[in-house]
Amino acid sequence: MVDYQAISFYIGVFSVVFGVATWYFQSRRSQKITQASLFMQIHAQWRDKQFIENFSDMYKWEWIDLEDYVKKFMTDDMSVIMTGVIFYFEGVGELLKEGLIEIDIVYSMFGDRFLMWAEKFAPVLVGIRDYLETPERYRNTEYLYEEMKKRQKIVRKLYQK
């Protein structure tokens, strides 16, 4: 004799399990698509000629201390260059902090270039933050730097073997 109630129960259970599994795999796929889209948007900046020129030119900037930096580079033109680069890194740091993009992707895209830039400009960023008494200023860039340094250690260990 066929127990229709048991069959109905098992069909219901199977439907729920199937629905949950489908939802899980769709949400994972959606998350990967979102990360790929963010990657392409972040990567687009590194294909922008003006950004690359500005970022490269900043390596040539020389200063003695914060006062010297302010005199030389807090002009309208130079501030625009610095602000554009910082806003970019602030945005990437925020995406990373919120878990919207993975450190592996960010590091592989511009890890060493960012670390060199950040180490050169860290005293300026900290000096500006202290002078303006805004402890939250540049925190996402600082977070990005800290996470990149962690990732750099891991990558270097992998390549030393």
Image (tube, grey):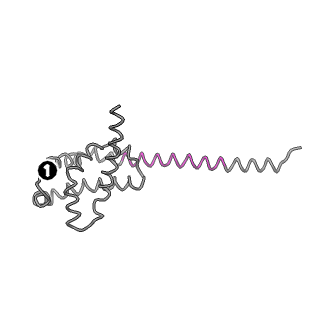
- Report the quarter where the N terminus lies: top right
The residue at the point 42 percent across, 52 percent down is 100
- For label 1, the residue is 61
The residue at the point 85 percent across, 47 percent down is 3
Question: In the figure, is residue 26 to the left or right of 117?
Answer: right
User: Whole-percent x and y of residue 150?
Assistant: 34, 46
Q: Is residue 29 rendered magenta in the image?
A: yes
* Farthest-out residue, right: 1
Camera-side residue of 130 and 15: 130
The residue at the point 11 percent across, 53 percent down is 63
- How many neighbours does mark 1 have within 10 angstroms: few (below 14), some (14-19), or many (20 or more)? few
In which quadrant of the rendered view does residue 108 lie?
top left
The kind of secondary structure element at disc 1 is loop
Question: In the figure, is residue 72 to the left or right of 110?
Answer: left
Most frequent secondary structure within the magenta stretch: helix
- Report the quarter where the C terminus lies: top left
Question: In the figure, is residue 63 to the left or right of 47?
Answer: left
Camera-side residue of 41 and 134: 134
User: Whole-percent x and y of residue 127?
Assistant: 20, 61
Q: Amino acid at mark 1?
A: Trp
* Farthest-out residue, top: 161
Which region of the structure is painted magenta?
17-40
Q: How many marks?
A: 1
Q: Is residue 3 rendered magenta in the image?
A: no
The residue at the point 73 percent across, 50 percent down is 12
* Farthest-out residue, bottom: 133
Camera-side residue of 161 and 84: 161
